[in-house]
Image: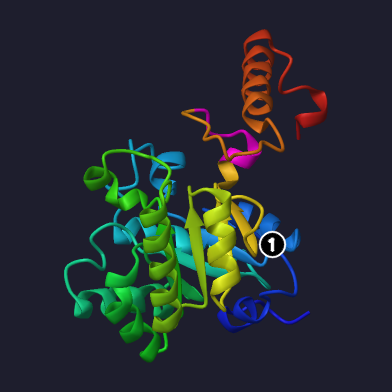
Amino acid sequence: MTAWTAAKIRAAKGKEKLPCLTGFDFASARLLDEAGIPLILVGDSLAMTVLGYPDTLPVTMDEMLHHTRAVVRGVKQALVVADMPFMSYQASVDEAVANAGRFVKDARAGAVKIEGGAFRKPLIETLVRNGIPVLGHIGLTPQSLREIGGYKVEGRNARAAELLLEDARALEAAGVFAIVLECMPSAVATGITATVGVPTIGIGAGPGCDGQILVSHDVLGLFSGFTPKFVKRYAELGKGMAAAFAAYKQDVQGGAFPAAEHEY
């Protein structure tokens, strides 16, 4: 099997569903890759799930580069997409190109993700012309948390849905290889998916998208801060880890570990 690239993801539209997940370290990236996940997003959600920040806004370029490098080292087949953090691309096109270039050149990511609709078209066009594949992201855009006033579903009325469709068309025209659709009515996402010629990857956008993405910590039951409606837990590893740590503590305090078989 050939490795996944931005071009291969684009060409998958209408041919196969794309199951995508986030990855934040070498060990999890290797497991994701071995499971056949085609796209691994080093999401800025690591700000909360890994680094303990209250939201995604504080995470830095250096932190994102650090985790992207670790994920890339664990991957042989998947496309690794680096999430550009807040204020790494908003100030100017020149700064955005430089920062995106660091993800591709230094961290060896296969693409970057940028939040925002039609107003991002000039930036995305510039990045693509400079050889940097871009994954778009519209709907709920968490980096705009302060401006939009919290996490909420987008596109609930006809005009809002129309604007989302316009955004998707603009991103396609700008050259994105796929578009994340986050937190919008299923009918809106299905309509966008049928209209644009690049894959849509839904998160809280219903089954009509070309693919789906979730945060791995949510899927595995490792993050208990809050659970969005769109999350399906496939394991409760957090509870298992807590039980293992407690058992280890009990064995050490009671003298059961290390036992004879653990000695040299």
Determine if residue 110 is in view.
yes
Q: Position of residue 27 (x, y in %)?
A: 62, 53
Q: Position of residue 6 (x, y in %)?
A: 56, 79
Q: Which residue is mark 1?
A: 37
Mark 1 surroundings within 10 Å by alpha-carbon count, few (fewer than 14), some (14 through 19), many (20 or more): some
Residue 26's quadrant in the figure? Answer: bottom right
Q: In the rendered view of the protein, which quadrant contains the C terminus?
A: top right
Q: Is residue 53 above or below residue 63?
A: above
Q: Name, please, the residue furthest toward the right.
A: 261
Residue at the location (58% across, 34% down)? Answer: 222
Residue at the location (62% across, 33% down)? Answer: 221
The kind of secondary structure element at disc 1 is: loop
Type of the residue with mark 1: Ile
Does the magenta run of residues contain 222? Answer: yes
Residue at the location (67% across, 32% down)? Answer: 237
| Residue segment shown in magenta | 218-224
Residue at the location (59% across, 54% down)? Answer: 213
Using residue 6 as the reference point, say whether residue 211 is left or right of it.
right
Q: Nearer the viewer, residue 114 or 72?
A: 114
Q: In the rendered view of the protein, which quadrant contains the N terminus?
A: bottom right
Residue 8's quadrant in the figure? Answer: bottom right
Q: How is the image coloured?
A: rainbow
Q: Name, please, the residue furthest toward the left.
A: 91
Q: Name, please, the residue furthest toward the front.
A: 158
Q: Nearer the viewer, residue 12 or 208?
A: 208
Q: Is residue 222 above or below residue 212?
A: above
Using residue 159 as the reference point, say whether residue 252 is left or right of it.
right
Determine if residue 65 is in view.
no
